[in-house]
Image: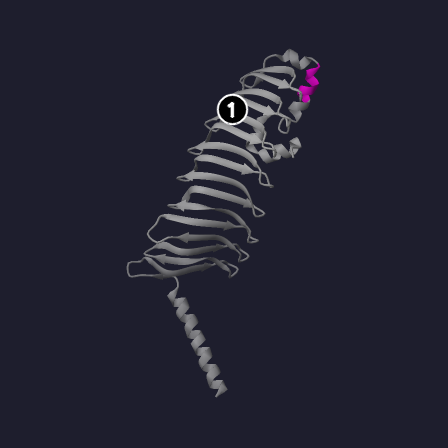
Amino acid sequence: MRNAVSTILVVLFSLSQSFAQDAANQLDANGKKQGYWSKKQANGKLLYSGYFKDDQPVGEWKRYHENGVVKAHIVYPENSDTASVELFDDFGNKVAKGFYVDRVKAGRWVYFEKRQKVAEENYVNGQKDGIAKTYYPTGELFVESKYVNGLQEGVYRAYFKSGKPYFECQMKGDKRDGFCQIFYQNGEMETEAFYRHGVRNDEWKYYDENGNYQYSLIYDEGIVMNTAVLDSIEQIRYQQLDINKNAILDPEKFMSDPSEYMMQKGIR
């Protein structure tokens, strides 16, 4: 009797598995995807899983890392072109959340590292648009900038952890264009600078930590014009700054990688 029951259970299990396989990845008479769909990776673990209705994803979808950990959790409301998304690293830590509209980024996106918010951006039609913010690992505001159609426009600002301004620069078409300032931690001006179309121009003024004027360099399309300054006692300092310009005074490196800039600057 026990053997008969065991045999029946095995048969029923096999039939249920067969039915489940037959029920998945189905096309209707019109060739449209319907119901539950999934696909496996070469290692046998799931690549994705979710549901279709009339060829459109609906409800909860998941995509997976190679190790089987969820990579993306996506929710598609029925009869809507908007999907909410959460992204995870291969350890299962959340790294981002936001929205897709017609499968491109839209609305507010938030990024995380070690469960701490490190950045937030706004998107329109897949392009950054609006205010973008970056945060220190401890939560304080680090950088604030504005985007229009994917390009930085207006004032780009960076802050010390204390909230005091560290760097301000005018942006136009994703390039530095206009007046820029760098400050010491005590609030005194360190550098007054000018850019034109992303290139150093006009007079750059340098100050010490007490706010005392030190010297100026005059630029024309990125070329220093008052070379006599470089032959003075300031030449040594200028050469040192030029060697370390990405870490000390040159906003160019700061703009492309502000976190590295601040670390090299020794800002805490």
Residue at the location (36% across, 57% down)?
52
On screen, residue 236 versus residue 11, left or right, reads right
What segment carries the magenta color?
Answer: 233-239
Q: In the displayed orientation, state which residue is furthest to the left.
A: 30
Residue at the location (47% across, 34% down)?
131
- Give the mark count: 1
Residue at the location (51% across, 29% down)?
156
- Relative to 255, say whether 37 is above or below: below
Q: Which residue is mark 1?
A: 198
- Relative to 237, say whether 135 is above or below: below
Q: In the displayed orientation, state which residue is furthest to the bottom.
A: 1
Depth check: 26 or 262 in front?
262
Q: Quadrant of residue 222?
A: top right
What amino acid does circle 1 point to?
A: Gly
Q: Quadrant of the C terminus?
A: top right
Instruction: State the image coordinates of residue 87 (x, y, percent, origin top left).
Output: 50, 49
The crowd level at tag 1 (other Cα within 10 Å; few <14, some 14-19, many 20+) is some
Instruction: State the image coordinates of residue 150 (x, y, percent, origin top left).
Output: 44, 34
Depth check: 71 or 186 in front?
186
Is residue 159 found inside the magenta-colored segment of the image?
Answer: no
Depth check: 224 or 173 in front?
173
Q: Quadrant of residue 106?
A: top left
- Relative to 22, say whether 39 is above or below: above
Instruction: State the image coordinates of residue 1 (x, y, percent, origin top left).
Output: 48, 88
Q: Secondary structure at mark 1?
A: loop
Q: Secondary structure of the magenta portion, mostly?
A: helix
Instruction: State the image coordinates of residue 29 (x, y, percent, origin top left).
Output: 28, 61
On screen, residue 162 versus residue 100, left or right, reads right
